[in-house]
Amino acid sequence: MAQTTKRAMEASLKRLLLVKPLNKITISDIAEDCGISRMTFYYHFKDIYDLVEWSCQEDAGRALQGNRTADTWQTGFLSILESVRANKPFIMNVYQCVSRERVERYLYEITYDLLIDVVREESVGLHVREDDQEFIAHLFKYAFVGIVLEWIADDMSEEPSALVDKLAQAIEGDFRGALERFAY
């Protein structure tokens, strides 16, 4: 039941974002739109930004499901970009109304979750310390997120598949190569 209520609030927020900016939406607006009390909202979320973050994490989780391996990271990353584009009014509104730092933190978290799994898989058979694996995942995370932030700022004009193809071509073999340079 809790997930159903959260999803109803998410749907209300996304509907409301089609007609007004995030910073003009109130908890009362969301509660009224989905037929719940304000207290019900506060039972699930501490504020609207908490709902936004939860919504982004849910979308990312669905996008990455089963696509966290060296063979499927491109599919996972493409799914993230397609999800972002499918929710363009929501994302653009959040991007423009929420601090850039918050958007970056969200993107860093989901991208790191994808990349650390890839790095760990690629490190099989190599002796690479855990902190070095994390360093490599963070390095690639910053590159990926930088590209995504530019893509969002450019109104998501480039096709997600073209962006992922360029990225894959640019870093082909680099996960394993970086790990080999850190192997002991």
Image: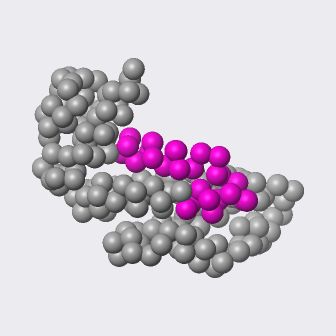
Q: Position of residue 54 (x, y in %)?
A: 38, 41
Which residue is found at the position 62% from the left and 59% from the top?
Answer: 75
The quarter holding residue 148 reads bottom left
Q: Residue furthest top?
A: 1
Q: In which quarter of the image is the N terminus?
A: top left
Nearer the observer, 84 or 173: 84
The quarter holding residue 174 reads bottom right
Nearer the observer, 118 or 19: 19
Q: Position of residue 172 (x, y in %)?
A: 71, 74
| Left or right relative to 22: residue 171 | right
- Residue 41 sits above or below residue 148 on the image: above
Q: How is this picture coloured?
A: one colour
- Residue 178 sits above or below residue 68 on the image: below
| Left or right relative to 162: residue 119 | right
Q: Main secondary structure of the magenta part?
A: helix
Is residue 86 at all visible to an observer of this figure? yes
Which residue is found at the position 59% from the left and 78% from the top?
Answer: 166
The quarter holding residue 156 reads bottom left
Q: Quadrant of the C terminus?
A: bottom right
Residue 171 is a magenta residue: no
The residue range painted magenta reads 53-78
- Residue 173 sits above or below residue 52 on the image: below
| Left or right relative to 52: residue 75 | right
Is residue 129 at all visible to an observer of this figure? no
Q: Residue furthest right?
A: 125
- Tag count in the figure? 0
Q: Position of residue 76 (x, y in %)?
A: 59, 56
Which residue is found at the position 24% from the left and 23% from the top?
Answer: 40
